[in-house]
Image (cartoon, rainbow, N blue to C red):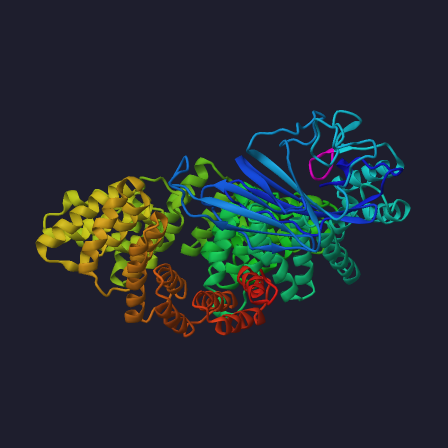
């Protein structure tokens, strides 16, 4: 409910709306919203229920004619429920009713939502249209079902009714709130919530438009000055909410302590005052970032957790997860952080968000020495959205420094070179970036780019203090001397630099390769293969010899490094299988497939054929070519069974995943799992297999299978001392026991759960289940004790809130 859409007649009433509670839950498409307001100093509440398909609501009256309660029924099982909510004027909760054999669809249950008044409030039920902005009257007589209902709670009279209105004589309008036309007067602009501005022209509007223009131009300091004056001049403006929101955004671009403190103060109050506004996720995110700048991790965590849990469909949920991952510093968190980054990256709503997550992930990887993956992430951002590095140039300079410290020259060169094109060419920063980028490119052997950047530096900054060093560095690339081996090499390098992309440079490269071959310096030939013809016999000789040397040294990194650029390699069958294994182990799957997919044509014996099949099947699975991988995998199992080589049976794990991930072959996965239970009865890897089967049982709603799989996982975990899925799987097992009314066994299992490393939410879930079971068993003291322990741990997460709400069941006055 927005002020700007309400008709306010000061002669009749004065209205101040304060949204103090916003509840929105997914129940199929059910939307629940509760708002409070005041009219003529009298409080009222409006509960809106809206669904994608019609449902029924009816009043139950007391003998006095007042509404005792309102019951709404929606057919079907919801995707998720909601906590019982108790406010100052009404309470609402739900329950799932049993199936009705006499219903139209006896297989479906109803969700019954019950709304009752509190504190002598009265209720009135209205069935409304989906679009309340029309001027068409809403007829009093409606069908038995509607997609939208409004329940108004009041003390003396319904709000928003004009004196001339007489409900007893009306044959239309049973909706108490009047909403104006949206056709006139309007402007052709939209507000920051993308809603049409319905206004009466005034100075505050003109001021708001100026502020908005300044924000669009990123003139944040000017905008802050205008906002400060506007808030003082027009304290009751229709646009006060939007102006304060703009102020919060503008302040986020300042790094001084005073701005941060003001942002926190204004942001916290704004979120509370406008809890249902579309911009709440953005403000929460700015609050969390500001708290992090002030090293207030707990406050930041509060808003980040809320963003993650309450606004999962906004861009800020992914950014919140990214910040949560950024906060993980302990060695024990090093495995968790990449999982959270990956989830945030997958859920990013736009390129900008994806880039932010990728860069944060890359910086985390740099700090943890995973340079290859960090460079991969930087390259993704640079290839898809290079302008990201222009959004916060200070951050980009920090990234360059971090890369330089770790000698990661390629991404550092890319970023520095790119930024040099977007700073003032007369500035020292421009000179610094050109110098660094040229130096980095030289270090990775990209002399062409280094030379160009050196020349740009000398062109724009000929008198700079670094000009002579840059000139000397550039000349070294073109150094030319004749003489012995070393002198020849230097000469060839000079020719290449002086005549790039010419016949002369091609000849120089060829001569360099011959010199290296004479000295059996195969590694250097391989390193310069970009400058040699693909069919160069010198290059092929170097590749073959380098691979053989690395194979003899058992150096798979070396093998993979050489073959990563090779189009072919000449080896015997045994050497080829060994090289194939190296490429697979180093995750060079496509290169392994390119070089060795046809090796079986040259294999004559069964053992080597089985080794090749096993590698081929694994490689195909790794490349996502699951159908081909399954075909090869079947051959592996058949040949392994025939030759008694059981060590190859573990291809079944890859086959199981491929079968299961395709709904058309999922039954094959279930059949294969039975064989795997006999092949690997106590194998740790079977835990993941049975966890997949557990999820399948949950999906199918099969309680027997659910309990069986949970028990199997628990047995395997105990056997292998690996409790990766605890307490999650234990809670599922406990739920099964409760569903079977096996309460005592469930309580014993809950005691076992206490032995695991539990998060706060795990502990609260455990206490809640203990309380729930004891409540069912009428052990009220034990139930309340568990709930008290649960609430002690906090009430900010879902389990804490459930425990807190459940305590009301133990209040003497609860009905």
Asked if residue 668 lies in the magenta stretch, the reply is no
Q: Nearer the viewer, residue 708 or 661?
A: 708
Give the residue at x 86% y 32%. Answer: 201
Q: Nearer the viewer, residue 170 or 112?
A: 170
Give the residue at x 66% y 29%. Answer: 140
Q: Is residue 682 above or below residue 60?
A: below
Q: Nearer the viewer, residue 102 or 671?
A: 102
Quadrant where the C terminus is found in the figure: bottom right
Q: Which of 232 and 8 is in front in this view?
A: 8
In the figure, is residue 269 to the left or right of 502?
right
Q: Can residue 475 be seen in this view?
A: no
In the figure, is residue 101 to the left or right of 384?
left
Q: Position of residue 638 (x, y in %)?
A: 13, 49
Q: Where is residue 461 in the image (x, y as percent from the top left)?
A: 71, 48
Q: Position of residue 609 (x, y in %)?
A: 14, 49
Magenta stretch mostly in which secondary structure? loop
Instruction: Report the span colored magenta.
Output: 190-196
């Amino acid at each position: 409910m927005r002020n700007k859409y309400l008709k306010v007649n000061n002669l009749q009433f004065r209205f101040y709306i304060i949204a103090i509670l916003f509840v929105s839950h997914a129940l199929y498409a059910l939307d629940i919203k509760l708002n409070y307001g005041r009219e003529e100093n009298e409080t009222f509440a409006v509960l809106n229920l809206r669904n994608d398909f019609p449902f029924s609501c009816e009043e139950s009256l007391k003998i006095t004619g007042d509404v005792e309660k309102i019951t709404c029924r929606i057919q079907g099982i919801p995707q998720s429920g909601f906590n019982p909510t108790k406010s100052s004027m009404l309470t609402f909760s739900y329950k799932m009713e049993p199936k009705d054999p006499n219903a139209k669809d006896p297989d479906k249950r109803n969700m019954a939502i019950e709304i009752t008044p509190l504190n002598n409030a009265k209720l009135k039920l209205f069935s409304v249209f989906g679009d309340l902005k029309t001027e068409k009257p809403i007829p009093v007589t409606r069908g038995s079902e509607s997609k939208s209902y409004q329940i108004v709670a009041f003390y003396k009279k319904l709000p928003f009714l004009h004196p001339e209105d007489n409900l007893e004589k009306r044959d239309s309008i049973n909706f108490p709130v009047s909403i104006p036309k949206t056709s006139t007067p309007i402007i052709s602009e939209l507000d920051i919530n993308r809603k049409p501005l319905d206004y009466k022209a005034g100075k505050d509007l003109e001021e708001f438009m100026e502020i908005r223009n300044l924000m669009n131009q990123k003139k944040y300091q000017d905008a802050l000055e205008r906002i400060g004056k506007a808030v003082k001049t027009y304290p009751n403006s229709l646009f006060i909410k939007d102006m304060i929101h703009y102020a919060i955004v503008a302040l986020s671009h300042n790094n001084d302590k005073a701005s941060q403190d003001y942002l926190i103060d204004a942001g916290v109050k704004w979120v509370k005052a406008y809890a249902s506004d579309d911009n709440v996720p953005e403000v929460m995110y700015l609050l969390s970032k500001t708290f992090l700048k002030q090293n207030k991790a707990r406050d930041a965590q509060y808003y980040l957790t809320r963003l993650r849990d309450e606004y999962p469909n906004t861009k800020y949920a992914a950014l919140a997860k990214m910040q949560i991952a950024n906060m993980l510093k302990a060695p024990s968190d090093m495995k968790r952080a990449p999982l959270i980054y990956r989830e945030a990256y997958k859920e990013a709503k736009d390129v900008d968000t994806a880039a932010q997550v990728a860069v944060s992930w890359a910086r985390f990887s740099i700090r943890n020495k995973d340079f290859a993956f960090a460079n991969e992430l930087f390259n993704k951002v640079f290839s898809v959205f290079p302008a990201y590095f222009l959004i916060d140039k200070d951050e980009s300079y920090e990234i360059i420094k971090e890369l330089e410290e770790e000698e990661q020259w390629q991404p550092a060169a890319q970023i520095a070179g790119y930024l040099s094109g977007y700073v003032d060419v007369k500035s020292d920063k421009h000179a610094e970036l050109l110098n660094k980028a040229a130096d980095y490119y030289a270090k990775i052997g990209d002399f062409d780019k280094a030379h160009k950047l050196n020349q740009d530096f000398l062109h724009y900054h000929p008198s700079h203090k670094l000009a002579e060093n840059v000139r000397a560095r550039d000349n070294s690339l073109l150094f030319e001397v004749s003489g012995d081996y070393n002198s020849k090499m230097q000469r060839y390098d000079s020719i290449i630099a002086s005549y790039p992309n010419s016949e002369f440079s091609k000849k120089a490269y060829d001569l360099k390769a011959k010199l290296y071959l004479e000295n059996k310096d195969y590694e250097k030939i391989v390193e310069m293969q970009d400058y040699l013809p693909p069919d160069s016999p010198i290059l092929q000789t170097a590749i073959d010899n380098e691979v053989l040397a690395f194979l003899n040294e058992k150096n798979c990194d070396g093998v993979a490094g050489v073959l990563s650029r090779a189009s072919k390699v000449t080896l015997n069958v045994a050497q080829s299988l060994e090289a194939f294994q190296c490429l697979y182990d180093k995750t060079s799957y496509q290169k392994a497939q390119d070089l060795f997919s046809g090796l079986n044509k040259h294999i004559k014996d069964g053992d080597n054929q089985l080794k090749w099949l096993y590698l081929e099947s694994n490689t195909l699975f790794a490349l996502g070519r699951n159908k081909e991988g399954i075909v090869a995998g079947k051959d592996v199992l058949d040949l392994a069974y025939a030759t008694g080589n059981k060590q190859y049976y573990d291809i079944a794990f890859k086959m199981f995943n491929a079968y299961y991930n395709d709904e058309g072959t999922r039954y094959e996965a279930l059949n294969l799992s039975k064989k795997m239970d006999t092949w690997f009865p106590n194998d740790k890897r079977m835990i993941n297999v049975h966890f997949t089967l557990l999820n399948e049982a949950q999906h199918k709603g099969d309680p027997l299978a659910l309990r069986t799989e949970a028990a199997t996982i628990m047995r395997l975990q105990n056997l292998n001392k690996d409790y990766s899925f605890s307490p999650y799987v234990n809670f599922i097992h406990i739920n099964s026991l409760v569903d079977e009314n096996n309460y005592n066994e469930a309580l014993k299992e809950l005691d076992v759960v206490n032995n695991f490393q539990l998060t706060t939410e795990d502990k609260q879930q455990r206490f809640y289940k203990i309380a729930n079971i004891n409540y069912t068993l009428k052990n009220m003291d034990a139930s309340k004790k568990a709930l008290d322990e649960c609430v002690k741990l906090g009430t900010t997460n879902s389990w804490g809130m459930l425990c807190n709400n459940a305590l009301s069941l133990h209040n003497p006055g609860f009905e």
